[in-house]
Amino acid sequence: MKAEYQQRQQQFLEKLGTGVAVFCSAPRAIMHNDVDYNFRQDSNFYYLTGFNEPEAVAVFAPNHSEHRYVLFVQPKDLSQEIWTGARLGVDAAKEELGADAVYPIGELEEHLPRYLETGDPLYYHFGHNERFNQLILKHYQRLLATLPKRGTGPRAIADPSILLAPMRQIKSAAELALIRRAIAITVEAHQCARELAAPGRWEYEIQAEIEHVFRLRGGDGPAYPSIVASGPNACVLHYTENQRQMAAGDLLLIDAGCAYRYYNADITRTFPVSGQFTGEQKAIYDIVLAAQKAAIEQVRPGNTYNQIHDAAVQVIVEGLVDLGLLRGEIETLINEGKENQTQKYRTFFMHGTGHWLGLDVHDVGLYKHNKETWVTLQPGQVLTVEPGIYIHPEATPAEGQPEIGDRWRGIGVRIEDDVLVTADGHEVLTAAVPK
């Protein structure tokens, strides 16, 4: 992977032009008292460096005479490493990570200004690490104050995602290999979960089986909190309590994905716990499945991102009208209230049909260029396609819409696949999970 990171660094340096960029590692997060959460590196920092330690800073200064890529890292310290694990250290970081210069993190304030003064603008994301935020702002303000005398240095601060997000959106062969591995592990976990699910089982038992497979097969663990939602819990989009005992006649919605070397899978399947749908469950499931198939067909280069969602909405609205859960002209139901997201179908389908996928589960990248113009799909992008219908037990119909019969209440269905945009269409990366 070293060559992969070097290629990314070179591409990013070229994109910087006259600018200079600073990236800070993620902060440690406290669970309670002196217990930390497992460390998870900032995705942008990791994408450019491959370095997985806290208390680190990366500087990209394409106009510096000697050092275009600089790292500040924790020095070796056995007294600390005994407690928290091995550190790469300054010397090994220079050798293994390919930086032009590597300094101890304690020397950041000493060396940082001479790199910042070589570029304009300064690209920096004010994120969760407040200590680094204040340090960067302090040095920027000092350089700005002396700019009239020096004539060089940053005059403005911009978010580096402007440059980096388009790079991260197009996945390299190495990235796709990691995503495919995350998916392969997730596929096995979903299959094991389906085999285990039965009336009388608890949702947390299914969660335990899924996450056992994630770790057993070498994954980092869950990419996000696993959703194991039976019966009416499937109508809660981000249900993660997983504390209900499953009963005969329930649907079980599982939304779970494995992280593998920082790359993520994201799969949802819904199936009957007893092995057989009721008539109402099957009717809703068939609409969602047809909507997903229609949406996936829109995944191809040259189409715009909204065409995916529009295709799913068309099928869902038509299906709900056929079932008597919506009433009115199809186009009116789809478009009336679109400006402020108050369409009447949103009683049952209230979210988008997907998101970008990569280092982050909801990965970086624009969906729209402006209010009117949607992003055009390109080969190498990976996205989810996940329509759903949720008839909450306490749902009330939109104004002018029919009453919701009790036989429909408590049915929640979502089907989600991870899809790669290819040169001539798409590839459903998660097709191995039955649906």
Image (spheres, rainbow, N blue to C red):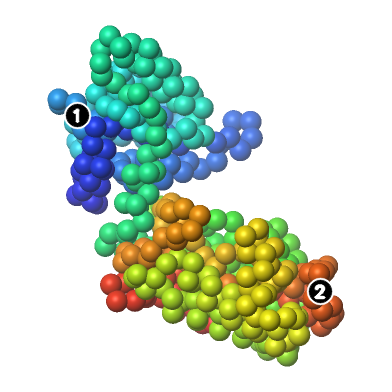
Q: Do tag 1 and tag 2 residues touch (Cβ < 8 Å)?
A: no
The C terminus: image quadrant: bottom right
Quarter-wise, where is residue 42 in the image?
Answer: top left
SS category of the residue bearing label 2: loop
Q: Tell me how far mark 1 sits from mark 2, CA to CA.
A: 64 Å
Residue drawn 65% across the image and 84% down it: 319
Quarter-wise, where is residue 300 in the image?
Answer: bottom left
Q: Is residue 201 visible?
A: no
Q: Which residue is mark 2?
A: 400
Nearest the eye: 249 or 378 = 378
SS category of the residue bearing label 1: loop
Nearest the eye: 292 or 55 = 292
Indicate the position of residue 363 as horizontal and vertical percent values: 45, 54
Q: Is residue 316 above or below residue 130?
A: below
Q: How many marks?
A: 2
Numbered badge on residue 63: 1
Q: Residues within 10 Å of mark 1 (few under 14, many from 20)?
A: some
Residue drawn 45% across the image and 69% down it: 418
